Amino acid sequence: PRGLMWFRRDLRVDDNAALYHALRSCRQVMCAFVFDKRILDALPRADRRVEFIRESLVELDTELRRLGGGLIVRHAVAEEEIASLAQTLDVQAVFANRDDEPFALSRDAMVRGALANAGIVFRTFKDHTIFERDEVVTQAGAPYSVFTPYKRAWLAKLDAFYLKPYPTRGYADALGPPPEAFRAPVPTLRQIGFEPTNLGQLEMPTGALGGAALFDDFFQRIERYQAARNYPAVRGPSYLGVHLRFGTVSIRQLAGVAHQLMLQGDSGAATWLSELIWRDFYFQVLSHHPRVAQGKSFRSEYDKIQWHHGKHADGLFDAWCKGQTGYPLVDAAMAQINQSGYMHNRLRMVVASFLCKDLGLDWRRGEAYFAEHLNDFELASNNGGWQWASSSGCDAQPYFRIFNPVTQSERFDPEGKFIRRYLPQLARLPNAAIHAPWTASPVELEAAGVKLGENYPKPVVDHAEARERTLQRYGLVRGAV
Ligand code: FAD
């Protein structure tokens, strides 16, 4: 039989479950990727993720051609295009890796239906997580809603089987080149209606080669992860989020290496593996509770919260987005996401907490902003992170724990290195003043060239007052006031 491998968020040849099964079960396999108009039309015209995908496709196509195949790249509505392509190419089966986001599930259901009408089978595989759906549940068969027991069960279930790579290269003979009519270079950004971004200037190598290079680099310092990961000025984390998002690295490979090191007593690797388990955890939360993707709180009582809204609230939201809240760590973090599409994990927690617990704004506004700007945007993890910060989520931060943006800054950026990098107008303030410039003396401000209200904003809220309002807001919901 002939098969079609449909790449989506698994843009690599090595250790790819669907590609492996396609190559094993078909005499000839063709490969395709669809720039889905339904997704692209909703994005801003300059989007680093689209450029990341495009660059990664160029690499994937080159690699597939080297192996005797090639990538057919289309710009269309995916569910229509895949069914029509499968018929034109006269394949008997289409292979893809599973994607459990609600949009993808409904798209895949349509594809399955359309293919079935044409007598073509649609086969999907787990590739994006170590455990998916209900593979890790309680003994009673219920989904976990607390991370620690989930992690325990996850680790207990893990064995070599789940980490084993899919050896696609051994079966690459089955790859077939696209027919002449479909043999074209990967379209340029402009051909699919997008403008170039600053991706090329960022330290964010694309494709499977880029993912491998970042992992090699991280591997050298993984043992320091636990100690370094909370300090945004330090190169502590892996920066692999975007590669995990688009499948330019294999989660099995990453988890396998981390697990091996953990067994050898490497606490950095153990902590990092835990983060990968959080990723699986949030995927299973989304899979069991798809309502969280429809703007619903995981804990429904939190949907009663009255968020600050109206013109003043809109102004505060705008200040948050632009990094003009007057709280340097928050503003530097927002400058980081705005300039690069990346934000350090500690800062994601700080700015998310600031949005809902200092500004009193609905967390869904922040969630949507992150969804548009993060290179590694992952619906499940982003929603999980926001619901954690707003206390409405599964195993979330208790509502009465409210980050103090100044204390967080003093603890995690003690010398203000990160702040200075992103807010050059504050660079000459002494360490003692950089976390809260409004506490600096007029002499200090003058010496540093900082004019509050002119070249750097005064704080848009008073943290102590905001904290009281938040306790009240949440307390009402909890019946505690
Ligand atoms: P590393 O520290 O090197 O971690 C390695 C990988 O583990 C990450 O790439 C990610 O896949 C996974 N991971 C780490 N922490 C978490 C976590 N808390 N939850 C789930 N997975 C995790 N992560 C995303 O991948 N996409 C998002 O859209 C996203 N939005 C977030 C929003 C908020 C409000 C918060 C608080 C966190 C969010 N995270 C998200 C989790 C985390 O901040 C990022 O995964 C991490 O900062 C990515 O950088 P890294 O690859 O260098 O991380």
Image: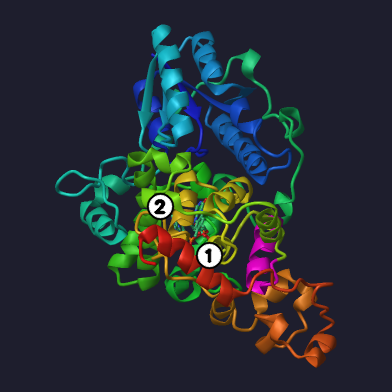
User: Going 47% across and 59% down the picture, which residue do you hit?
Assistant: 390
Image: 127 above or below 334: above
Residue nearer the viewer, 422 or 468 = 468
Instruction: Kindly identify the amino acid type of the residue bearing the numbered disc 2.
Output: Arg
The mark nearer the N terminus, 1 or 2, is: 2
The coloring applied to the image is: rainbow
Q: Which residue is mark 2?
A: 279
Instruction: Kindly identify the amino acid type of the residue bearing the numbered disc 1.
Output: Lys
Quadrant of the image occupied by residue 57: top right
Quadrant of the image occupied by residue 313: bottom right
Is residue 61 something one can see in this rendering?
Answer: yes
Q: Which residue is mark 1?
A: 357
Q: Which residues are magenta?
A: 325-339
Residue nearer the viewer, 452 or 346 = 452
**Separation (CA) of disc 1 from disc 2:** 25 Å
Q: Is residue 442 magenta?
A: no
Q: Dot 1, how many residues are within 10 Å of its Cα: few (below 14), some (14-19), or many (20+)?
A: many
Q: Could you tell me if the residues under marks 1 and 2 are in contact, i.e. CB atoms within 8 Å?
A: no
Count the labels in the image: 2
Label 2 residue near ligand 1, CB within 8 Å: yes
In the image, 18: left or right of 322?
Answer: left
Residue 301: image location, x then y, percent: 37, 51
Magenta span: predominant SS is helix
Instruction: Tell me the quadrant of the picture where the C terminus can be found.
Output: bottom left
